Image: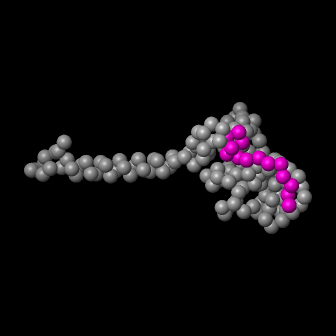
Amino acid sequence: MSLYIGGKILGPIFGFLGRTIVGQFSRKLIAEEAVVAIGELTGKGYTASQIAELFVSKESDVLKIIYRGLTGSESNSGALFLAEEAEYAASFAAKGNVGAKGFAIPSQNFEYMIKEGLIKTMNDVNAKTGQKGLEYMITNPAIKQQVLKAMVKVGGN
């Protein structure tokens, strides 16, 4: 459909502007809500906002405290290692045992993330200290980012 104003055809102009604006808006929505992780159990795709929501607790939630070493190397492309025990998490630190920082996550959500394969578990022995413990490993960059954000909000130990 074309619109005539003052003898000019404006339909193609409005059509181009509409496609451009709508196209940019929809690309922005798609980019913001792109699937960043796929659950191994269900095959469900998770967006960054859905993962972030797993770290939000409600008043009725039972919280689980998880720790990481204070000088971990999660800022690069390596995995983020976490533990339930502060002392064991502190032994992960790249610069020696300098302490650990804790954060709270709803227990049910944490277990769900493990079942979905978003967080891997392993019983391991720390090569530096010889300590044995249960480790949680996160390799997905979007999930690592949400864990680090959660740690900043809580303030840790």
Residue 72 visible in image: yes
Apparent side of residue 10 relative to residue 59 in the rendered image (left or right): left
Q: Position of residue 142 (x, y in %)?
A: 61, 52
Q: Nearer the viewer, residue 63 or 122?
A: 122
Per the image, is 34 magenta? no
Q: Residue at 86% of width from left, 50% of height from top?
A: 133
Estimate the x, y position of residue 65 in percent, counting from the top left: 78, 45
Q: How is the image coloured?
A: one colour
Looking at the image, which residue is at 25% across and 48% down?
15
Q: Residue at x 77, y 52 (%)?
A: 82
Q: Is residue 109 visible?
A: no
**How many numbered discs sit on the rendered protein?**
0
Q: Is residue 116 magenta?
A: yes
Q: Position of residue 138 (x, y in %)?
A: 70, 51
Q: Is residue 62 above or below residue 72?
A: above
Determine the residue located farthest toward the top in the rendered image.
Answer: 60
At x 62%, y 36%, the residue is: 42
Task: Give the position of the N terminus as an image quadrant.
Answer: top left
Quarter of the image holding residue 38?
top right
Q: Residue furthest left?
A: 7
In this view of the protein, which residue sits in the foreground, 5 or 153? Answer: 5
- Specify the segment rendered in magenta: 114-127
Q: Is residue 43 above or below residue 98?
A: above
- 14 sits to left or right of 103: left
The residue most toward the bottom is: 95
Residue 99: give x, y in percent of width and height. Answer: 83, 59
Q: Viewed as shown, does residue 100 lie left or right of 8?
A: right
